[in-house]
Amino acid sequence: MGAAPEPKLTYRGKFVVRTLGGIFLIGCLLMLGLGETILKEHLQGPLFLLFWTWCFLFALLAGLTAVLDLICVRHAGKKNRRELFQRQFLGKP
């Protein structure tokens, strides 16, 4: 007699949040790599500032989507714990 499998931690919009986070992170890493190698000679003056500002914004957006994902996963975990408690101790399905 084994224990019932635990439900997966999932939430609405998980695919969208993680996809956007991945896109922002890949964009930031691409800009970092290109800015330090191929485009280094071409980035002068205002173009330099604009390029690295966009790179910083991509990094910031990647971090914010990671925090949003963290909040959503914690909320889903609390919901699952609450449902498990009700099912085990209160007999509610």
Image (cartoon, helix red, strand yellow):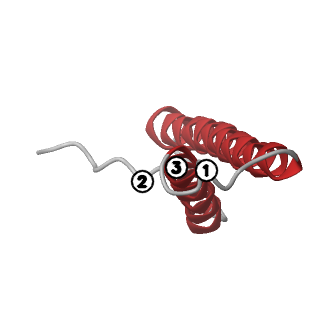
Disc 2 marks which residue? 8
Mark 2 or mark 1, which has the lower sequence index?
Answer: 2
Q: Between residues 9 and 84, which one lies in front from this camera angle? A: 9
Disc 3 marks which residue? 29
Q: Position of residue 74 (x, y in %)?
A: 61, 35
Mark 3 or mark 1, which has the lower sequence index?
Answer: 3
Q: Is residue 36 left or right of residue 57?
A: left
| Badge 2: residue crowd in 10 Å (few <14, some 14–19, many ≥20) | few
Task: Identify the residue at image location x=53%, y=55%.
Answer: 34
How far is the residue under mark 3 from the one under mark 2? 31 Å
Q: Between residues 74 and 64, which one lies in front from this camera angle? A: 64
Helix, strand or loop for disc 3 = helix
Q: Position of residue 9 (x, y in %)?
A: 48, 49
Residue 40 visible in the shown view:
yes
Q: Position of residue 73 (x, y in %)?
A: 58, 42
Q: Which quarter of the figure is the N terminus placed in?
A: top left
Helix, strand or loop for disc 2 = loop
Q: Is residue 64 left or right of residue 30?
A: right
- Look at discs 3 and 1 and give the one toward the viewer: 1
Disc 1 marks which residue? 41
Task: Identify the residue at image location x=15%, y=44%.
Answer: 2
How far is the residue under mark 3 from the one under mark 1? 19 Å
